[in-house]
Image: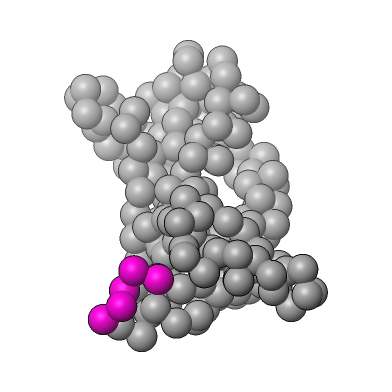
Amino acid sequence: MPSHNRKGILMFLVTKTYDHSLGLSACFRQWRADHSHCRFLHGYALSFKLTFAAEQLDRNNWVLDFGGLKPVKAFLVESFDHKLAIAEDDPALDDLGMLAGLGLADTLVIPFVGCEGFAKYVYDWVDAWLGDVHPLECDIRGLRLVEVEVREHGGNSAIYQGAK
């Protein structure tokens, strides 16, 4: 069912989910959470839900062709499949990074970690990719990425929404 965007224009929304069963098992720690066990290395098989919107459907009556999202799946696998995600400001960055040099971890350094950080990281990449691959459709049909939801498990998730 269509929804309205912030300007009141009718929008069509679709979602693409990459479920926990995909096996995107990432390890990370919330180093600032000194009051919590989340400060220790731990991990989850993450899931990702991407929501796309368009003011007008394409000639197939689609918001976008789900089959064209193979590069997105490849990016998620490359970024989160058996990765040690490290916040770029983690005071143990060098020590954790040494695990990669020892062949003990495949690391990914990003601005901040956790569901919120992963959602923004994925949003930024997919949003740029969408603009590169479908620039005319983004302009003409209003095609855009609305939000990315990341789940650690059934009980915890975070959503990042773009400013567009």
* Quadrant holding the C terminus: top left
Asked if the magenta segment contains residue 79, the reply would be no
Give the side of residue 16 with respect to residue 70, left or right. left
Residue 51 in view in this figure: yes
Q: Which residue reaches farthest bottom?
A: 37
Q: Position of residue 80 (x, y in %)?
A: 61, 63
Residue 1 in picture, x, y percent from top left: 32, 42
Name the residue rendered at 79%, 74% in the picture. Answer: 103
Q: Quadrant of residue 116?
A: bottom left
Percent position (x, y) of residue 122? 51, 48
The image quadrant that residue 86 belongs to is bottom right
Q: Nearer the viewer, residue 129 or 9?
A: 129
Please indicate whether residue 87 sits to the left or right of residue 97 in the image.
left
Q: Is residue 125 above or below residue 102?
A: above
Q: Position of residue 16 (x, y in %)?
A: 51, 52
Q: Is residue 59 above or below residue 16?
A: above
- Residue 37, placed above or below residue 96: below
Where, by quadrant of the figure, is residue 112 drawn?
bottom left
Residue appearing at x 60%, y 34% in the figure: 129
Residue name at image x 47 percent, y 51 percent: 111
Dominant secondary structure, magenta: loop
Residue 67 in view (yes/no) = no
Q: How is the image coloured?
A: one colour
The foreground one among 44 and 88 is: 88
For the residue pair 26 and 110, the one nearer the viewer reads as 110
Report the span colored magenta.
Answer: 31-35
Q: Quick check: 27 left or right of 146?
A: right
Q: Which is more toward the observer, 134 or 85?
A: 85
